[in-house]
Amino acid sequence: MAAQDARDVAAAVKFARRHKLRLVVKGGGHSYHGASNAPDSLLVWTRKMNAVGMHEAFVGQGCPPESAQAAVSVGAGAMWADAYSAVTTRGGRYVQGGGCTTVGVAGLVQGGGFGSFSKRFGTAAANLIEAEVVTADGEVRIANAVTNPDLFWALKGGGGGSFGVVTRLTLRTHPLPAFFGAVFGEITAATPEAWRALVARFVDFYATSLFNEHWGETVSLREGKRLKLSMVFQGLDRAQAQAVWAPFFAWVRERKEYSVKEPTVMAVPAREFWNPRFFAQHAPGIMTMDGGAQASPDRFFWTGDGEQAGWFIHGYQSAWLPAKLLHAEGQALLVEALCAAAAQWDFELHFNKGLAGGAREALAATGNTSMNPAVLDAFALAIIAGGSGPAYPGLLEKPRDEERAHGARRPRSEARWTRC
Ligand SMILES: Cc1cc2nc3c(=O)[nH]c(=O)nc-3n(C[C@H](O)[C@H](O)[C@H](O)COP(=O)(O)OP(=O)(O)OC[C@H]3O[C@@H](n4cnc5c(N)ncnc54)[C@H](O)[C@@H]3O)c2cc1C
């Protein structure tokens, strides 16, 4: 059922109750677990409810006038591309969402939700001010810090599809920094000793220079003693970002046991960061437009995210790494663990998915959500995963290998990675 508004959703909930049907909700459809569909269910699809409206001074229902703040209200069916276009490209403000533009706003916020700049702005859930939600009795309710506060707290990270059908979300907006940017590079070590020294140098560099609100995203430890850097920054310009990294790259270049792919440091005016027209002109190919017949001209995805469409995940594990591992006495242990793990399988450290080192307001707001509080003490999320290419009709690259998928040892070159 393609709902148009909260009344449609309420009617669907009441119908499902009356007929004892399982009800599932689908937003962006990006659940890794397939939680937004189920056999023999009534599926409520929110896609058409994708209006986005900005507020200069939003006051939640029942909240005091002095709580007024800049905000955006987003229909539950919107994708992050819709929100970023309205809030940043057209509105000149920032809203905390996810890195992947095709993820649904409602699913991501209810799951906690990290974006590249979460160390500065907190999780998406931490930025929720108010939700309109249809509860299991079929009533349309408002949830915020004052009205239905328990429901509000649960929605901030308690998991999509658990506490009701959200029909609209209102999220805090922030002033935009001047620039967003990225640092890409890859360093290969010639020997196991050089590899260990490189990992130790990077860990120390991270602890002293990157463990702050400016830096997020990913470093991968790869087969062949390769350290792949895909970091992003906010609140610095290109020259400042280059200066941060200069001592690290100087250390690497001074040693003949490393080969370095020339690192790239780039920055774009923050307002253009989600603007397909800007990238079409300055970096064609980095974004792919949604080619659907009724697609809005604002809908795009990062081309690098495309390989995740339909991929088949064999295994996926993650662990938060506590910030005490960055202290002098913890670093040796961390380096030991990273080298031991990298000897088995490629893996990634996602620094924006642990909030330690982040801005005080980001930590305070994220602490006031239903997410596991370990997120506050972690400096990164370590992700290790294995999978193979698209495995669905129409997306098929090659038939899925059941034997391999069920545990037979596979060459590590088949490992696939997610940046999201
Ligand atoms: C390619 C990809 C990229 C990703 N990138 C990121 C990222 O950058 N950061 C991050 O934190 N996570 C990321 N994720 C994880 C993503 O945030 C979660 O999978 C999220 O739950 C997806 O939301 P959705 O609306 O797109 O998915 P759906 O599959 O539609 O929904 C996910 C869950 O939320 C429920 N739900 C959806 N809408 C509603 C609603 N209106 N009311 C109540 N329940 C609802 C569904 O029933 C389901 O249980 C990514 C996932 C993928 C596949």
Image (spheres, rainbow, N blue to C red):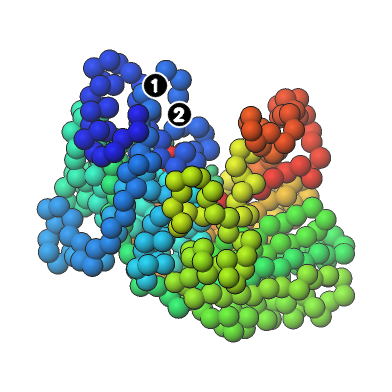
SS label for mark 2: loop
Q: Ligand 1 falls in which quarter?
A: top left
SS label for mark 1: strand
Tell me which residue sits at (44%, 46%) in the image: 294
Q: Are marks 1 and 2 in contact (CB under 8 Å)?
A: yes
102 vs 370, left or right, is right
Q: Which amino acid does label 1 sit on?
A: Ser
Specify the quadrant of the image occupied by residue 65.
bottom left
Which residue is nearer to you in this view: 226 or 25?
Answer: 25
128 vs 399, left or right, is left
Which residue is denoted by mark 1 in the rendering?
41
Tell me which residue sits at (17%, 60%) in the image: 59
Query: How many labels, in total?
Result: 2
- Outermost residue to the front: 293
Which residue is denoted by mark 2 in the rendering?
37
Tell me which residue sits at (39%, 21%) in the image: 41
Pointer 1 local density, CA inside 10 Å: few below 14, some 14–19, many at least 20: some
